[in-house]
Image (spheres, rainbow, N blue to C red):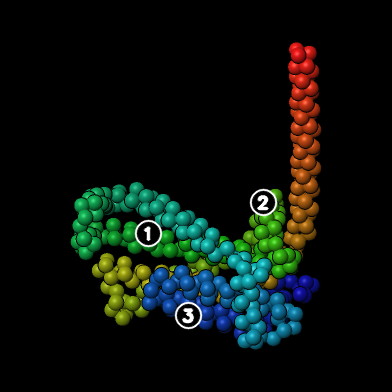
């Protein structure tokens, strides 16, 4: 790796060599989310098993291009497979990232809804009445069509539901990408250290990050901050374009809340796709910055590793001392028991 060049210089120098992999990533993104249009549940398969491994292949391919290798289908397939085996297996923490993003997005949407209702009640006095009516209808077991039909009586309530869906989707998208790309330094460090013990490397990495949290976050945010405006802008671009297409195709009617709800089921994943596509050409700079960041972190990780090793050694010594004390106490107990047996046998002989 050419460590003398800055991430910006590497981006300019190696962009042409990395461009085929960027296009593969864009194609994989389109395929993954296009399959999701047929069934939203398919995204649970296409994202972790297609898109994320291709993202990892992009990170690996960039290092190969630095080393003088050219893009090839064989190299792409090799990088793709490496995500599922060896020290890189699950290095992006997809499952944890999904659940954390889902829980925080759910919490964020609830907070948003509460704030929205608190403010909107002063603008639309009928909002509170509509909410109570809808809740009572749901509790009484009224059908979905009847509930949605009653929504037309309060446009403010309709707007709230639609905006809550969009806010939840946006928060999830931002956080999921944040957690996934936030694992990129760990993926690179696992490759640099070349350790077979993934858990050991991860434990040392997490300990390093925890003990240097302020410095870590400061240095990481220097090159990672553009991710967030790009994700937000891309999300709304994808959302707007997909809704526009659905309206033009007459699958969605803006005056019909039911069709708008159904349309958002497709538009929000397209918003996520918009975020991913807008990020695609920034990712090489991000990964080059991650590379420089990881190399700066290696000495700190080694110091942390030595510190943890010393702590474990001291703990082993302490446990050994405790065990030695326990052994001596056990030996003394046996000795006292033997002395008691001897005294008892002498007393028995005197009695006889």
Residue 203 higher or lower than 249, as above or below: above
Residue 329 higher or lower than 25, as above or below: above
Q: Position of residue 75 (x, y in %)?
A: 66, 83
Residue carrying label 1: 164
The structure residue drawn at horizontal position 76% and vertical position 38%, both measured from the top left corner, is 323
Residue carrying label 3: 31
Residue 291 higher or lower than 30, as above or below: above
Q: Quadrant of residue 333?
A: top right
CB under 8 Å between discs 1 and 3: no
Distance from the alpha carbon under mark 3 to that under mark 2: 38 Å
Q: Position of residue 12 (x, y in %)?
A: 69, 79
CB under 8 Å between discs 3 and 2: no
Q: Secondary structure at mark 1?
A: helix
- Can you tell which of label 1 and label 3 is closer to the viewer? 3
Distance from the alpha carbon under mark 1 to that under mark 3: 28 Å
Residue carrying label 2: 210
Q: Quadrant of residue 246?
A: bottom left
Instruction: For label 3, count other residues whose C-alpha is less than 10 Å away and answer few (under 14), some (14-19) or many (20+).
Output: some
Residue 144 higher or lower than 349, as above or below: below
Q: Position of residue 166 (x, y in %)?
A: 40, 63
């Amino acid at each position: 790796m050419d460590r003398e060049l800055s991430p910006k210089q590497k981006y300019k120098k190696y962009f042409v060599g990395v461009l085929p992999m960027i296009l593969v990533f864009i194609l994989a993104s389109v395929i993954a989310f296009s399959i999701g249009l047929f069934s939203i549940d398919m995204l649970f398969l296409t994202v972790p098993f297609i898109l994320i491994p291709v993202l990892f292949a992009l990170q690996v391919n960039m290092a190969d291009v630095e080393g003088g290798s050219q893009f090839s289908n064989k190299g792409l397939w090799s990088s793709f497979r490496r995500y599922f085996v060896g020290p890189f297996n699950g290095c992006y923490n997809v499952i944890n990232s999904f659940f954390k993003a889902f829980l925080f997005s759910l919490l964020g949407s609830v907070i948003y809804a509460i704030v929205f209702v608190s403010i909107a009640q002063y603008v639309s006095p009928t909002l509170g009445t509509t909410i109570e009516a809808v809740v009572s209808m749901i509790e009484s077991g009224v059908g979905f069509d009847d509930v949605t039909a009653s929504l037309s009586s309060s446009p403010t309530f309709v707007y709230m539901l639609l905006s809550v869906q969009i806010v939840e989707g946006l928060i999830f998208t931002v956080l999921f990408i944040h957690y996934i790309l936030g694992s990129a330094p760990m993926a690179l460090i696992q490759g640099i250290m070349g350790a077979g013990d993934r858990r050991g490397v991860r434990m040392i990495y997490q300990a390093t990050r925890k003990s240097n949290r302020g410095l870590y976050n400061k240095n990481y945010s220097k090159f990672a901050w553009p991710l967030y405006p790009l994700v937000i802008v891309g999300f709304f671009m994808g959302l707007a374009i997909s809704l526009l297409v659905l309206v033009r195709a007459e699958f969605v009617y803006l005056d019909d809340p039911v069709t708008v709800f159904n349309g958002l089921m497709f538009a929000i994943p397209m918003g996520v796709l918009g975020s991913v596509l807008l990020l695609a050409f920034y990712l090489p700079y991000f990964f080059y910055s991650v590379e420089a960041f990881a190399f700066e972190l290696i000495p700190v990780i080694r110091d942390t590793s030595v510190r943890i090793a010393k702590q474990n050694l001291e703990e082993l010594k302490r446990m050994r001392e405790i065990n030695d004390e326990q052994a001596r106490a056990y030996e003394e107990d046996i000795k006292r028991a033997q002395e008691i047996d001897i005294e008892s046998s002498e007393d028995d002989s005197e009695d006889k």
